[in-house]
Image (cartoon, rainbow, N blue to C red):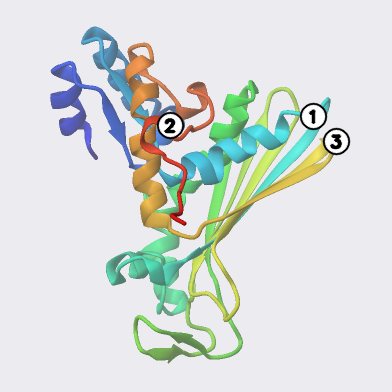
Amino acid sequence: MNWSAYHRLLGAGINVICHGSESYFPQGADADLAHKIDALAKKNNSTFTGTGIWDFSRIWPGILVAGPCTELRSMKHYSLTNAELANERMMRAYGVDMTQADFAEKVTAVPGQLGELYKGIPAHVMHALGYTITKVTERREPVLSDQPVWCGTLNRSLEPGTSLGLRIIASVETQEGPTATAHVELRILSPGETEHMMWTVDGRPASKIRVDRADGVHSSAACMVNRIPDVIAAAPGVRLLSELGPLRPPLTRIRPSTSSS
């Protein structure tokens, strides 16, 4: 809960760019708190925006791939994230190395855990596309294997039946009819697997877009920095990154490589 920090900064007329996952689509995370943030920001002529790696890898790809549709029936988001790229504390939060009973108690049954954040992805995209959201649901379950799986962070194999991480299944229904689902896995990867995000569209035309993430840490920081001009130019209040247009690089800082002969 970052309300005290938001209150201090926005109350002083300082724009806020937040990396917290709830901040991407605060209306979907906590409508009452989103209203408070919006009112405070407008009162003090400041702007609140949530951004980071989801900006280019999850939210905008969904918006862009739906753009050419003359008919849209449904959208599906799939993503695979390497749990071992996080620190060990976060890896445990994903449920890695838990028994199925422990996972049910410490991950599935606990409100406000990581799974609660990811349902905001399809909700944000459908909201950005202009649909009226009527229902959002999600479930969390452990990712299991019937074979031992090596975990480099723990320097040992995880036995069959032990959780390799978290799977989140989210769905969004709209008043207009089109639906969206998300299948998100944060887990130990098998050899040859890589992190990626993907959207597919069931519509006319049907299409698919995939983003492979090579350097998540750099990308997260760069998205926040590159959004600064958009946030400064935006109207006061809560401003979703989907309102700000696709992310752009800072042209004044990018120079073509040159080679000496």
- Residue at image coords 34%, 84%: 154
Can residue 21 be seen in the rendering of this structure? no
On the picture, is 24 further left or further right than 60?
left
Determine whether, in the image, residue 201 is placed left or right of residue 16: right
Give the residue pinned by disc 2. 251
* Left or right placement of residue 149 versus residue 253 in this view: right
Q: Earlier in the sequence, mark 1 or mark 2?
A: 1
Asked which secondary structure carries label 1, the reply is loop
Camera-side residue: 56 or 131? 56
Q: Secondary structure at mark 2?
A: helix
- Examine the image and state in which quarter residue 35 appears: top left
Circles 1, 3 touching at the beta carbon (< 8 Å): yes
Q: Toward the viewer: 21 or 35?
A: 21
Disc with the residue nearer the chain's start (3 vs 2): 3
Observer-nearest of 250 and 238? 250
Residue at position x 72%, y 28% in the image: 67
Residue holding disc 1: 69
Give the amino acid type for the residue marked by disc 2 in the picture: Leu
Residue at 38% over, 34% down: 226
